[in-house]
Amino acid sequence: MYSKFKDTLASNSHLPMEEQKNILITTFNNWMGENEQVDDVCVVGFRI
């Protein structure tokens, strides 16, 4: 699971931050499916 997350971040790193956020939200929701979220998730992004 960590590998897919890392790949998602790397493959979208060239996009604007807002678009990256939307892709992460969509990817997470698709992965979660109909299951209830039971853990907290925190992703922090910054521009260098």
Image (cartoon, grey):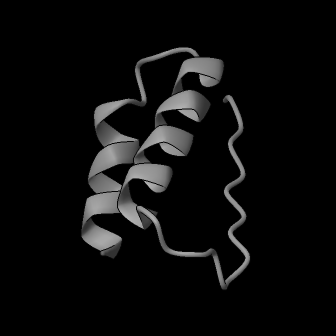
Residue lying at 71% horizontally and 37% vertically, measured from the top left: 46
Residue lying at 60% horizontally and 33% vertically, measured from the top left: 21
Q: Where residue 39 sits in the image (x, y, percent)?
A: 67, 83
35 vs 33: above or below:
below
**Is residue 29 rendered to the left or right of residue 17?**
left
Near-viewer residue (38 or 11): 38
40 vs 12: above or below:
below
Residue lying at 60% horizontally and 75% vertically, measured from the top left: 36
Q: Where residue 29 sits in the image (x, y, percent)?
A: 49, 52
Which quadrant, please, contains the C terminus? Answer: top right
Residue lying at 47% horizontally and 33% vertically, measured from the top left: 23
Q: How many marks?
A: 0
Instruction: Pick out the residue farthest to the top.
Output: 16
Which quadrant, please, contains the N terminus? Answer: bottom left
3 vs 30: above or below:
below
**Is residue 10 rendered to the left or right of residue 44?**
left
**Is residue 44 rendered to the left or right of residue 23?**
right
Q: Where residue 44 sits in the image (x, y, percent)?
A: 72, 52
